[in-house]
Image (cartoon, helix red, strand yellow):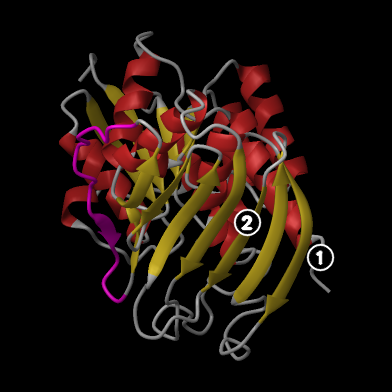
Amino acid sequence: MSNKIGFAVLGLGHIGQKHCLHICENPKAVLIATADINSTLNFEKYENQVNIDNLLSNTQIDVVNICTPNGLHAQQAIQSLNAQKHVVIEKPLALSTADCEAIQQASDKNNKFVFCVMQNRFSPPSQWLKNLILTKTLGNVYSIQINCFWNRDDRYYTPNHWHGNITLDGGPLFTQFSHFIDLLYWIFGEIKINHAQFENFNHKHSTQFEDSGIVTFSIKSGGVGSINYSTSAFDKNFESSISIIGEKGTVKLGGQYMNEISYCHIKDYEMPSLEKSNPPNNYGNYQGSASNHPYVIQNVIETLNNKSNPHTQVSEGLAVVKIIEEIYKFRK
């Protein structure tokens, strides 16, 4: 055990259980303890359930994975960092840039790593698209369109749950679609938000925020774009896609989770063979983005063994939160 990295998981909802599973599957990791506000939870594999104070006082724990509601991320991350633990934080890093900056300060003060979970960066189509932009294979980028049309209905927004609560959830750009805001930032860098419009069509009874929105933006190189999103798709997720029109070609990543290349037509370009994307996370009544969390856990282990660096830095998680904050400034 001494040669393994000791992990603990805060929050045993769907995503917390995914973290537990992938920690247990990694031969260089060991799950020491878990904690959840619901003390009645009983998972056979993850039976060492304690309260957060006991968890943070355990010297066998090197890393705390924070899988709790969005509004708790900053407080629990800072508490864990001050207890001399590295932290893995599920998206979003926090619900405000001020909280993100406080996490960064605690990380610097305690000389501990913060790993932001943005697992869509590991998907082969995402990496392919980033390389296209880095190598300027498309030439100047003229137009970018992101469409995210998912289903989150009353099976998801249950009464007295954190989903739908403005303070704990924050809204669909934080909870559902921050992965795709991250890909936009990761590939194109900082963007300028020009306008945003929001509507709440069929979630007025279950959420304190919009279920649909349209955002327009500009990128530094001069291109323009839009983000169209909704959690009102009937019964199941429809698509998550990004289409790019460039000087030398047009490409589209499509499927339900930007997990496939739907279109590629580029001047003097031969399409390479890509590895198959991982399936989406399955949460029973609904699905989420690609199940790339094993790569996240492996990156933590390699970083703590001085063989790598955090795949997503705090500064990048902060940049995504800042973009969403800028969009939500248009909320009435």
Of the image marks 2 and 1, the number of the one nearer the N terminus: 2
Q: Which residues are magenta?
A: 269-285
Q: Magenta span: helix, strand or loop, mainly?
A: loop
Q: In the rendered image, which residue does mark 2 sit on?
A: 71
Quadrant of the snapshot with the N terminus: top left
Q: Residue at x 22, y 58 (%)?
A: 43
Q: Residue at x 19, y 43 (%)?
A: 276
Residue type highlighted by circle 2: Gly
Q: Is residue 241 magenta?
A: no
Mark 2–mark 1 Cα distance, whole angstroms, equals 21 Å
- The percent position of residue 280, horizontal first and vertical second, equals 28, 57
Q: Is residue 48 visible?
A: no
- The percent position of residue 257, horizontal first and vertical second, equals 36, 57
Residue type highlighted by circle 1: Phe
Q: In the rendered image, which residue does mark 1 sit on?
A: 330
- The percent position of residue 139, horizontal first and vertical second, equals 55, 31
Q: How many marks?
A: 2
For numbered disc 2, what is the local secondary structure? Answer: helix
For numbered disc 1, what is the local secondary structure? Answer: loop
Instruction: Answer with the quarter of the image where residue 126 lies.
Output: top left
